[in-house]
Image (spheres, rainbow, N blue to C red):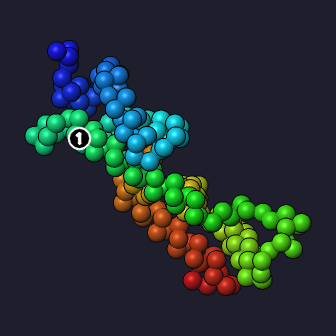
Amino acid sequence: MQPYPDEQLMQLIQEKQSFALRILYDRYVRLVYSYAVKSGAGTDASFAQDIVQLVFTRIWTSNKGYDPAKGQFVNWLITVTRNITIDQLRKQRKQEVLVSFDYEIPETEHTALSGRDELQETVARRLLKQQIEAAYPYLSDNQVQLIRHFYWEGYTLSEIAARNGEPIGTVKSRLHQALKTLRKHLSPEGEG
């Protein structure tokens, strides 16, 4: 029999007893890792390692832990792992389709553009980037970071709130205020 049942370890983790997290990690790291690999990481070991880190970080930082009345611990752990894996796969896909504002077309490739529309899109993207950066001085540092994380890096508002240790409502309010300010300074002649 194991010296500590999973339920007791989760209670100790809620009390911030780090040894309990180490025991739980050693007990379930292979399960979480193999689930992450089978769920979409394929041969990308770093993706699966990121999932493992995120799962155990969530276990350590979350106020909502495992509830024994709702089922076995291992089922709860797989559900947490599945949710985090899905979130990360979505974020990965979102980042693949996000337009990079840092994209530069070398002078020699301008002639290789297949049409005028692509050139116009590139110019519009550069202008928008310049306008947004020109409006940054009107935003607080927290607002600039929020815009970068949310729009350019693909983090969800919930993930940003968790990273900053803030309520989601605070993050949403900050985003609303930042967008109002950007709208004012991105519109013609500063009208909003």
User: Is 126 left, or right, of 4 in this rendering?
Assistant: right
Left or right of 166 on screen, residue 118? right
Q: Residue at x 14, y 40 (%)?
A: 71
Viewer-proximal residue, 28 or 158? Answer: 28
Q: Answer with left or right where residue 38 lies relative to residue 2.
A: right
Which residue is under mark 1?
76
Residue drawn at x 52%, y 40% is 43
Q: Which amino acid, by three-letter code, is at mark 1?
A: Trp
Where is residue 122? Give x, y as percent: 74, 73
Quarter of the figure with the N terminus:
top left
Picture quadrant where residue 134 is located: bottom right
Element carrying mark 1:
helix
Q: What count of labels does the image hold?
A: 1
Q: Is residue 110 visible?
A: yes
Image point (57%, 77%), residue name: 183
Q: Is residue 183 above or below residue 28?
A: below
Instruction: Pinpoint residue 46: horizontal percent, then vertical percent.
Output: 53, 37
**Label 1 crowd bin: few (<14), some (14–19), many (20+), radius 10 Å:** some
Quick one: 121 or 138, which is closer to the camera? 121
Q: Using the image, determine if residue 1 lies above or below residue 113.
A: above
The residue that appears at 88% across and 67% down in the rendered structure is 107
Q: Closest to the observer: 33 or 174?
A: 33
